[in-house]
Image: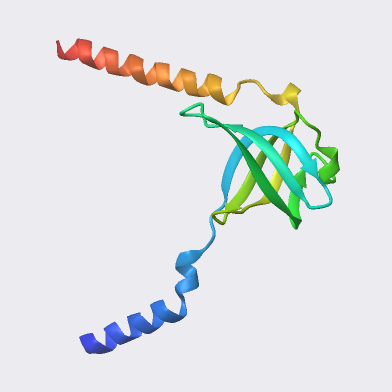
Amino acid sequence: MHLKTVGFILVLFLTFNSSIFTEEIPERIDGTVISVDEKSRILRVDFEHPATFERSQLEFNVSESAGFHDFKKLTDLKKGDLVSLDYLDYGKTLKAIYIIHVPREKIFFTTKEITDALVKMKSGQNHEKNQNQN
């Protein structure tokens, strides 16, 4: 095949199959339920960033097709409940696609405790490395 033909085929492929490269990849957060509005299908969650510890309140649109784990309907979630949810970020809109209710008795470590432990381990490794270089 000629180089021009290969290039033309590649351009056609990329043009008509661009959806391959724009596949939506869900993100996941863990947080605490602030409120649930069943009628408008809105879930508000308090979220603490695990690295910066910055707190924010996020609002998720919960589609009719969203999956639930450990609860049956949106109104089963109450203020203060822990959730882990997968969502798609559309800029101004966050769309929850899968929500897991996390019973408190199943939590062994908080995100902050895990992050603190990892930071301590990392700083300990750096300290040992510096001592070995001296």
The quarter in which the C terminus is drawn is: top left
Does residue 16 appear to the left or right of 130 in the view shown? right
Mark count: 0
Q: Position of residue 20 (x, y in %)?
A: 48, 69
| Residue drawn where x is 62% and y is 35% of the image | 30
Q: Is residue 9 above or below residue 49?
A: below
| Residue drawn where x is 76% and y is 46% of the image | 68
Does residue 30 appear to the left or right of 9 in the view shown? right
- Report the front residue among 21 and 53: 53
Does residue 8 appear to the left or right of 67 in the view shown? left
Does residue 130 appear to the left or right of 66 in the view shown? left
What coloring was used for the rendering? rainbow
- When asked about the image quadrant of residue 101, the answer is top right
| Residue drawn where x is 52% and y is 22% of the image | 114
| Residue drawn where x is 57% and y is 53% of the image | 92
The quarter in which the N terminus is drawn is: bottom left
- Report the front residue among 118 and 92: 92
Q: Position of residue 48 (x, y in %)?
A: 57, 30
Q: Position of residue 97 (x, y in %)?
A: 68, 52
Q: Position of residue 102 (x, y in %)?
A: 72, 32
- State the residue lying farthest toward the left: 134
